[in-house]
Image: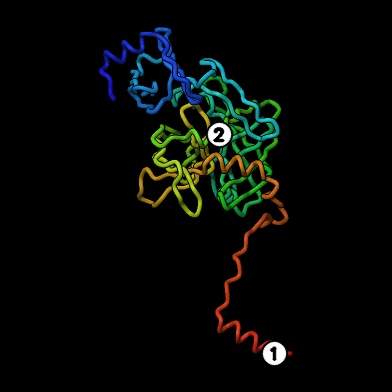
Amino acid sequence: MRLPRLAIIMAAASGAVALGSVSAETVKLKNGNTVTGQVVADKAEFLAVDLGYTILQIPRANIESVFEDDASGDETTEESTEGKLYRTAKLKRRTVRELVDTFGQGLVKVLTPKGVGSGFIINEDGYVITNAHVIQGETRVSVILFLKQGESLGRRTVKDVEICAVNPTVDLALLKFGKPDDVELCPLYFGDIERVRTGEPVFAIGNPLGLDRSVSEGIVSQKSRQVARMLVIQTTAPINPGNSGGPLLNMRGEVIGVTNMKVGVFAEGLGFAVPINYVKEFLEYRGAYAYDKDNPNSGYHYLEPPHRQQKGEEKSEQGDQELQD
């Protein structure tokens, strides 16, 4: 149901409207009032909020900020991820420009003798997630860090990056670099695939064709598209060579996927990303995919089961065995 603009403004000005849902979000208005409900559409002109009995469209001009449940509208609330390499938090919804300014330093440029890719920092110890195909067959890997220096952006190259784990099946790799003493890292937060919705806006940061820190916007076209024997996120955000390994983020700045491919040379709006739940499982069981520099093919490889023999073949083999006996 679409409400007239006057009804929208009157409803928004009447005070706080609460919805008892665990996934509710609070929209803080510029007049000081709040509206709480589930955001079902995030458009450039308005937010559509499900109040349980109707859909309220709130003009962007009236919105100050958006944040989830009991998360502060001004601060980041860290969530416990004890024993894990990544972190999560309750973050407020912001514009792409604000999110890039806040989390853009979490992107790294991955360099190998054969080419350039992307990756992103996941904690203060220098761990980085990228695609397996970015470093496949390589033993020498470097990363370029993007660092704020006043109003400008500096670059710092870190060599001798360690390859910790590789899982080609889901196209993921875990790297680790030595953190320079004078550098403060900006790890990115992991999102939740269960909260990803088809149609929601997203953006990708990467180094397409070597162009540093390029940002592309789009939406989630399909949350679980089957491609190459795995389920991936399909997005309209443009993906090009060099984007591989970079983060796909939602409008809170949470990583929901790792961009890894596009379809066709001439196809547009058909980008794909490895879902964040695959990344979490990869990190949890990273010991199974531990990389051995002396044996780049190390790790578990699943073999095809033996084919069932035809009856004629079985009788022939039995006859051959009797002759041998």
- Up the image or down, 255 lies above or below 56; here it is below
- Up the image or down, 277 lies above or below 123; here it is below
Q: Amino acid at mark 2?
A: Leu
Q: Which residue is mark 1?
A: 322
Would residue 155 be found to the left or right of residue 34 on screen? Answer: right
Would residue 155 be found to the left or right of residue 83 on screen? Answer: left
Quarter of the figure with residue 271: top left
The x and y percentages for residue 160 are 68, 43
Residue 14 numbered tag: none
Quarter of the figure with residue 56: top left
Residue sitting nearer the eye, 225 or 266:
225
Image quadrant containing the N terminus: top left
The x and y percentages for residue 258 are 52, 41
Q: Which residue is mark 2?
A: 107
SS at mark 1 in the image? helix
The x and y percentages for residue 209 are 47, 43
Q: Residues within 10 Å of mark 1 (few under 14, many from 20)?
A: few
Alpha-carbon distance for marks 1 and 2?
67 Å
The x and y percentages for residue 218 are 39, 35
Looking at the image, tell me whether mark 1 or mark 2 is earlier in sequence order: 2
Residue sitting nearer the eye, 198 or 164:
198
Mark nearer the viewer, 1 or 2? 1
Q: Residues within 10 Å of mark 2 (few under 14, many from 20)?
A: many
Quarter of the figure with residue 270: top left
Task: Say if mark 1 contacts mark 2, CB within 8 Å.
Answer: no
Which residue is at 53% across, 29% downward?
104
Q: Amino acid at mark 1?
A: Glu
SS at mark 2 in the image? strand
Which residue is at 31% across, 12% downward?
9
Which residue is at 46% across, 18% downward?
26
Which residue is at 36% across, 12% downward?
12
Residue sitting nearer the eye, 11 or 102:
11
